[in-house]
Amino acid sequence: MNFPSPEGYTPILQQYLEQRAKTGDAILFFRLGDFYECFFSDAELIAKELEITLTSKGDSAHPGGKVPMAGIPVKSAENYISRLLKAGFKVAVCEQVGDATGKGPMKRELVRILTPGTLVESEFLEGEKANYLACIFPSNPNKTMSKQESELWGLAFVDISTAELKITEVPENQLLLELSRINPSELLFATIRIKDPERITIERKLCPAGLSESNYSSSTRAINHFDFNVSVDKIKERFGSHSLAGFGCAHFKAGLQALGGLLDYLEYTCNDSLKSLSSIQVYEVNDSLKLDEQSVRNLEIFETMQTRTKKGSLLGLFEENLTTKMGTRMMREWLSYPLLDVSQIRKRQQYIAKLIANQNLLNNLKVLLSQVTDLERLNIKLKTERLNPRELGWIKNTLLILPGLKALLQDIASTPNDEEQPDIFEIKLSNNLIFKAKELDLALQDELPIVSGDSGIFRKGYSEKLDQMKDLVDQNEVWLTNYEAKEKERTNCKFLKVCFNKAAGFYIELTKANKHLAPEDYKIKQNLTNVDRYITKELKDYESQFLLAEANLKSIEQELFIFLRESLSIYCEEIHALSKQIAKIDCFVSLASLAINHNYVAPNVDNSYNLSIKDGRHPVIENLLPKGHFVGNDLWLESRSEQQVIILTGPNMSGKSTFMKQIAILCLMAQIGSYVPAQSAQIGIVDRIFTRIGASDDLSQGQSTFMVEMTETAYLLNNLTERSLVLLDEIGRGTSTYDGVAIAWSVAEYLAKSGPRSIFATHYHEMNGLADIYSQVVNYQVSVHESTNELIFLHKVLPGGADKSYGIEVARMAGIPKEVLNRAQGIMAQMNAKNSTRKTTSIKDCAEQAKLELGI
């Protein structure tokens, strides 16, 4: 957006333009009295986006003499700003910070730039999701990489609302995968400014191919904000450290530049929540099971593909038994980063087992956890002095619950051998914090206001001075009633009134017809059309006393509130640790409840290459069906064995996709430490899950369904390992039959030779011939019962390959007209007859040729 130079405009517009020059691509909300106003193109933009009236402000310096203008009331600004942020815009807020002097416009300052990834305000955040700002920076920003070279990227991300800050470095071919796991609300990267031959400034984004066109809300900063030395100094200053070695990230050159750029951006947005950051977490991208964005979508882990909602997703199932927002955020993190370490997985299983063994405890924990507030995010507001009285009350109420929580868990908490990894059930709650919570309970009312300047924060008896002021203010109506009665008797005027309002103060009101009854000590205060208003010395003295008491009352309450808030803030680190512990307990309560309610078992997770499941079930679909209606299935896969690749055949709607998805979901559940829906299960650690199930066009990139399918297939073939789990459905269906079979056959051969545990679902029943060539390939089918009148899906996976696809039968079930079905059957009969006499090369011939090449 281009804005004019301030010169020549009125003082107010000059002030607006000077502030607007600081906000970049953020819309400036400029405080004018009770409204936030926007001018120029900002006004036109918000008028359109918020559907409000676009007006104008006269100014001769502007072409046409009128500057576009639109505004919103300060009192309802949250709703409007929230709508703009959800639409991907950034909003800068400029407040009045001085008093009117009559000499030029009131002083105003830029106090905050709100962007999707820098929010701490609870009214703008989703409680169930982390709100990440991610920043990336390449290790070689000035070097053009060849296709054979792999660029290393620094990655830093923060949720400023919880003070979670992480840093790593990742190869470019894994960067998109890692960002999809983080799912940032905003992505920050650098730009290099160069000059073209005509000396016109243009910007080249330092961003890997494809990312700048992604769906992430993105922001850019000039490359000088990512300077290595400046970044290191900024990080040291922020964390009060002379060395970065203690954080374990000193070797991350690009990572430190990304972190430096991120901190610089937080400073630019005037975010005082920076002071809440106290540590840096270093992590390696290969420390957890990876799922690419396509697999996360296919498996419907966080939301369904159809409705894009949590209901019907795996997280939605877990959330049914989660009671805190902290727990939901942590469960989302566990699902994004499943474990690879068997000992950590088994430790989580042990926690679940303890809760299952004591269901009475489990139920009592649910009751207590349901009373817990979002301690993690409120703690950041406490630390940054943003906490209001009502939120202080919420923290206090949660702290008062914790001794009961600690007492409940003490019987199952074990003494840890490792001080650095305490038992999750051992609540670390200091006596000082308990005492502080009780002190707050004695001080604070049960019902608290949101604004600290409002009265009604403290209980009677907490402060003698405050009680005196309250008594005087609270007795105002009584005093006025008594004074009015006294004056009516003195003047013998039953129509006399003693009134008070904020504009006129205290006064005695007489109608014009009764003004002759006013005593000599009644001094006229205001003449109105039908009445006169008077003041007396007694009423004037009382007014001064009352207004002083009212002002003192607010001042004293504000001082006491700030004192209590600051006295609690010294426990911020302990409260933060408690919030993380409560979130973990909530997750284990959820997983234990699921296991009990749905008859889940503890899988045997080990470092083998085996994948053995007895009577496995899809947890989400099973939950949606009447109890006992889901048909369970067995599975055995093992890398480098006689059952490494399964060729799965069967008709549409028979359950092939459900079977494959449930295998992936059971592995995922097992590796977050959860019990699984099965009779028994052995899960050899999986390092990556690849799914290619279903396809659609990507018209934005000009890619057909088949091109999308091939791109996704290429990605998984180029990145799999022996420890991976590969689930493919209908590879090759987007092209001609012979092309499709050839591609499917060669992909399955590649999987057989490469070693990952794989299930290859297909309608090409010719693929069953692979089992005759490769000992590690086996055929399975989803069984059906075919009668004269109908096709019954049994949803049972059994050994053996299907010899037909039942496409016409499925078409009949879908309601295709009988005439069309009859014609299809005739065409099919003709094609089968031709194929039986055709002497061209068949897929069987290809199989025989493959045997010769392999020496079989």
Image (cartoon, rainbow, N blue to C red):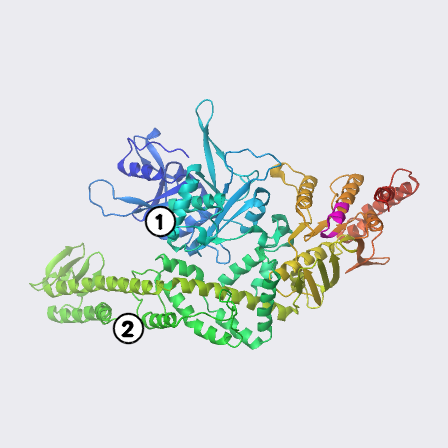
From the viewer's perspective, tell me whether residue 601 is left or right of residue 3: right
* Viewer-nearest of discs 2 and 1: 2
Q: Position of residue 213 (x, y in %)?
A: 55, 39
From the viewer's perspective, tell me whether residue 443 is left or right of residue 204: left
Q: Which residue is mark 2?
A: 460
Please say whether residue 187 is visible from this viewpoint: no
Seen from this angle, which residue lies furthest left?
Answer: 520
- Nearer the observer, 770 or 466: 770
Crowding at label 2, few (<14), some or many (≥20) Cα neighbours within 10 Å?
Answer: some
- Nearer the observer, 305 or 490: 305
Quadrant holding the N terminus: top left
Q: What secondary structure is marked by label 2?
A: loop
In the image, what residue type sits under mark 1?
Answer: Pro
- Magenta part of the protein: which range? 749-759
Q: Position of residue 2 (x, y in %)?
A: 40, 33
Crowding at label 1, few (<14), some or many (≥20) Cα neighbours within 10 Å?
Answer: some
Q: Which residue is mark 1?
A: 73
Residue displayed at 84% across by 48% down: 773
Residue displayed at 52% across by 75% down: 364
Magenta stretch contains residue 757 = yes
Magenta stretch contains residue 640 = no
Q: Position of residue 29 (x, y in %)?
A: 36, 44
Lower sequence index among marks 2 and 1: 1
Residue displayed at 51% across by 63% down: 327
Seen from this angle, which residue lies furthest right?
Answer: 837
Q: What secondary structure is marked by label 1?
A: strand
